[in-house]
Amino acid sequence: MKKILALIVSVALCVTDVCAMPKNELILHENTQSATEGTISAEPEIDTPSAILMEASTGQIIYEKAADEQLPPASVTKVMTLLLIFDALDEGKIKLTDSVSVSEYAASMGGSQVFLEPGETQTVDTMIKCIAVASANDACVAYIDRRQNTFMNIYNIN
């Protein structure tokens, strides 16, 4: 049930991003010329702070824009975080009533947030709601900070 909820949230986040885009930005190649008409732009025009496109089977980076710049977590990262939280709940590793302390770093996140304060303590249940409903970067990072060592290993495995 929790995985289905996470899937629905992820689809909603994806659809929201697409629907929010202006019509002329839906197709990246719309403004480029074909090879028979003239030259093709070497780089696509992408109106976003950063992007990376990798060929999955070889790992070759096809396109990148500010790929190493540190930015707040994107929605996909938040959905992955929710999935890992739900997995940990299913496996009995955590409970909805467990406490999550907010670090200085988590409280300093930009982007969408619920304005958590450094040292504030919330339950896992509250953090799930903050991440799923408000797409809160600060709540996501607060939970990740709680389990930093194991969390990155799980991200890389999954």
Image (cartoon, helix red, strand yellow):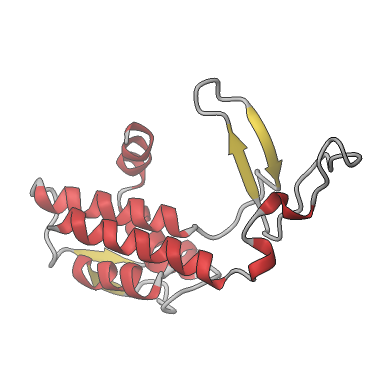
Tell me residue 22's x, y (percent).
64, 71
Say if 136 sits above or below 54 in the image: below
Q: Which is nearer the eye, 36 or 30?
A: 36
Residue at image position (66%, 50%) is 69
Q: How many marks?
A: 0
Tell me residue 55's x, y (percent).
57, 29
Tell me residue 37's x, y (percent).
89, 42
Q: Residue furthest front?
A: 36
Q: Which is nearer the eye, 134 or 53?
A: 53
| Left or right relative to 137: residue 86 | left
Say if 46 sits above or below 114 in the image: above
Residue at image position (43%, 54%) is 76
Q: Residue furthest top?
A: 58
Tell me residue 77's x, y (percent).
42, 53
Q: Which is nearer the eye, 24 or 21?
A: 24
- Whether residue 103 can be seen here: no
Say if 144 sits above or below 63 in the image: below
- Whether residue 105 can be seen here: yes
| Left or right relative to 34: residue 112 | left
Residue at image position (13%, 53%) is 89
Res. 68 image quadrant = top right
Q: Quadrant of the C terminus?
A: top left
Say if 157 sits above or below 45 in the image: above
Res. 52 image quadrant = top right
Q: Quadrant of the N terminus?
A: bottom left
